Image (tube, coloured by chain):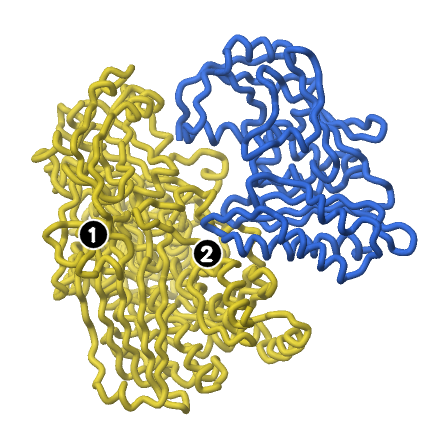
Chain colours: A blue, B yellow
Amino acid sequence: MIPSKFDYVRVNSIDEAIQQLKQFNGEGMLIAGGHSLVPLLKFRLSEPGALIDISRISELKGVRKEGDRIVIGALTTHFQIANDPIVKEYIPVLSETVRQIGDLQVRNRGTIGGNIAHADPAADLPAAAFVLDAEIAIHGEDGPETMNIDSFIVGPLITMLPENSVLTSISFAIPPAHTNAEYLKFSHPASGYPVIGVAVVAGVGENDVIDYIRIAITGVGNVAYRATSVEEKLLGQTLSQTLLKEAAQLAAEEGDMASDLFTSEDYRRNLCKVYTERALKSVFYSN
Amino acid sequence: MKKVVGARLKRKEDPKLITGNGYFSDDIQLPGMLHAAILRSPHAHAMIKSINVEEALKAPGVVAIYTGKDLEGKIGPVPSSWLVPGCNLKEAPQYPLAIDRVRYVGDGVALVIAEGRYAVRDAMYLIDVEYETLSPAVGQKQSMQIDAPLVHDDIENNIAFHWKAGEIPEEVCENAEVAIRQSFYIQRVAPSPIETRAAIGQYNPGSGELTLWCTSQNPHIHRMVLSGVLGISEAKLRVIAPDMGGGFGGKIGVYPDEALVGYAARDLGRPVKWIEERNEHFTASNYGRDEVLDVELFGKRDGTLGAIRVKNTHNVGAYLSTMGPGVSTIDFGLMVTGCYKIPYASCETFGVYTNTTPTDAYRGAGKPEATYQIERAIDLFAKEIGMDPIELRRKNFVQKEEFPFTNAQGLLYDSGDYEKPLAKALEMLDYNKFRETQKELRKQGKLIGIGFSTYVELCGFGPSKVAGAIGFQGGVWENATVRVHPSGKVTVYSGTSPHGQGHATTFGQVVAEKLGLPMDDIELVFGDTKAISMGWGTYGSRSVAVGGTAVSIATDRVIEKAKKIAAHELEAPVEDLVFEKGIFSVKGAQGFERTFQEIAKSANMAWNLPEGLEPSLEAQSFFDPENFVYPFGAHIAVVEVDKETGQIEVKRYVAVDDVGRVINPLTAEGQVHGGIAQGIGQALWEGAVYNEEGQLLTGTFMDYALPKARFFPEIETAFTETLSPVNPLGAKGIGETGTTASTPAIMNAVMDALEPYGIKDIEMPLTPEKVWRAISESEGK
């Protein structure tokens, strides 16, 4: 459980980080909280030539409201997010989701940027990112750019993060005031990762018609995803228990389910149905 | 002064440990120390065609690399220490490094020594081993088949031993009104102490003394076995067990790794440190359990049990571990009747070699398995005849007045009152009300279940005569020295070797009460073969019952001698001396007193001792009990099953244990809690899995599910006290009761919850998917 040899440099600005990435010519990796990367290093599954430590770049930390979005610096820890008053007020589903990541030690060290950039298919965070229409801000050699979470995560541990660039912040859309949200998770008894995690943000308008709905599912397959066909089924419909049941059934039928030592594809499909239905019920009927 | 024995004292050990001042193996730093790493086989079964160490030897900092061939003739095989007689036991030699063939994933192939723990690992990865893979033997039942690959060429059908005990007249089984037949798999589990294994060797070429610090539950056994393996005099080998982060049986074993470290330290003349890595631990450290039990329970419709017949097929792994052979035979096979008066019993055990990591004793060792099968079978029997499981248990309990009681397999249960803890547990739970609530909740579609486990456990190893008769390669008596310093402060030396249990506190309490001293005046020394002449370590819930008794007797001897000195000084006959609360006084003569401290000084100065009395105040005891001790109790679990997902929630857990005299209720509860967590871990979450190629699929904590605190409700504990006649403390063992009782309690509760579906059994661990499948199948989905 000891990594192979690597160089280490600490940088104090985004520009410096990019410069170092260029210098190590594809051999350098950024490290912040280290909670995704260090285990890979210890198992020697990843053997970078250098670690470029960005954890002290102060401009990458903190939470702020910008118009109708909440912007969170990449270095903000899960613990800070879970307890941040702005997050709790405007996007409570994010607070609820990060509160369920790992354990206290992990939440104290792990950062939102590292988590999203690592793109673990079993991570909790992408579920919230999808329902809150997350935008990923990236600073590369040609300056800043943004990408939607949809196009950013493309596969297990695979993102569209360009070479020699730094993920600087993630912004989340504030859902309409009349919506409710839920993140419901079945955690693996060993790893604590979601075997399934369902995030829902939804609201009903006049005559019990569903006028806002976002559903995202993580853990079940190769990559977290927004269940758009399920959303389409629900949007504009009159709320009923039967409707939610049908929607959950659809989520289960349409999702790509993986299997592993702990669960089969069949069982995951069942979980997808049950957890989607429960999350929907909780959002629509809890108050 | 308040009673000290029985007081809820906080642990003496903890201030040191929780302030980071513990001294664990990895804290040891010696001048010039080298680091070791062991290259292990990635294959379950393969021939070693060649090992090329050239590149590795050139790596920076590398000092030496040893292969199995290099060590041939220089270091012996590591033997098993439990050679159970009468079972045609075939022990394959386990050389510290594989010579030409590897037999499990994790089998040692090369030992690398280098300057620094980073360098040694970098070098290890440069060793090039060419293997020719062979078909592996995986799974005990498959590995007994005629066409199964052989783990050791000269051991037919991979059968390591075939043991039998007990006879049942044929007609008892044939004429039985009720026969329950069920197979259970007690799956393989990883002891997983928070501290992995470690060894540090230091050799003095001048004196020829080798000091070996290692994570051992029994340093004297390590010394005895390793002196043979390394060919070094026991008098020149010092084994020290420093502070340890748990063992759970996984650190009983004498492993090849400690022998390798000792060898390298001597060969190189420099200290060598080896710290096992966590992922290495999953392949290189002994596992527990892995037994297939085929059980038949016979009896009458009125609930009278007549006989139990059990076959145990035990996966021993690739080699026999230190205690391995005893677990599924003696420990299991003699306890199959549990706490019931079943007239006949028989047990047949096959030990089977496979290409997997060896299995050894794990918390409870054989007794949890025995308890599991009888407690599960009893429930199935109750269901079959339509009797309440409590009533069936009560009907067949060994009754209070029948103790000492000889069970069907010939073991003598020392004392018991099985109704007492059961009644208390039922009261704590409010059983009758529970059944009403359960009915209500079932109507609402909720699946609530209750499960019982009334157990008896064999522990307190033990009478040495019996140990010899059952092939244990050691005595199991215990040794204590109580040394009183001139100031009256006391150092106690014990041959037990705690690694988290809190002996310094409980043994201290025994001494403090007897001598009338504050706890702070008593220091305990364990785990150093140079400080403690002999001893047999800590396992099998033996420490208080055997080691604590030795401490108690040695303390009595100190008092006896001190009385002679006090009598001499007070000019009174010894018979008239009274010793109470640390004061020697003369019966009926007020004011004639000496304090314990005054006598301690007199004894050590020896200025004025009675004629013929030797100086100093110190006594030793070697206590060899007449019998084992048999703690018992009743555990009740309440669970709720989510019928849509199969998830199980433990709602309540009530444990009433009777372990004889409780020295410290606080540490006793700690033992019960930990034991229950491990036992429930077996029932619900844990389980090592190998695939057909013999590859371990659960090699990290990402896949191997250890119980977490948040998985449990608050555990409700209580004790009843039925003293043991076997030792003067009246104490039994507590370390393994929770593990023994809790696994079947949980299983029975889940099966009770699933009763509406007619589900009788599900193989452990009860993962949500297995439960969901069982429900789905019964619904005909």
Q: Is residue A285 above or below residue B758?
A: above
Q: Residue at position x 84%, y 56% from top?
A: A238
* Amino acid type shown at disc 2: Gly
Q: In this view, does B749 lie above or below B352?
A: below
Q: Does dot 2 land on a helix, a strand or a loop?
A: helix
Q: Mark 2 lies on which chain?
A: B
| A268 relative position to B77: left or right | right
Q: Residue at position x 60%, y 48% from top?
A: A196
Q: Does dot 1 land on a helix, a strand or a loop?
A: loop
Q: Quadrant of the C terminus of chain B?
A: bottom right
Q: Do labels 1 and 2 share a chain?
A: yes
Mark 1 = which residue? B320
| B599 relative position to B149: left or right | right
Mark 2 = which residue? B681
Q: Position of residue B396 (x, y in %)?
A: 38, 83
| Residue A92 in view of the camera | yes
**Distance of label 1 from label 2 (alpha carbons):** 25 Å
Instruction: Using the image as rendered, state which of residue B321 and residue B431 is in the foreground.
Output: B321
Q: Where is residue B155 in the image (x, y as percent from the top left)?
A: 12, 55
Q: Residue at position x 40%, y 31% from top?
A: A1
Instruction: Using the image as rendered, state which of residue B573 and residue B286 is in the foreground.
Output: B286
| B622 relative position to B719: left or right | left
* Amino acid type shown at disc 1: Leu
Q: Earlier in the sequence, mark 1 or mark 2?
A: 1
Q: Residue at position x 40%, y 73% from top?
A: B375
Residue A11: which quarter of the image?
A: top right
Q: Is residue B468 above or below residue A136?
A: below
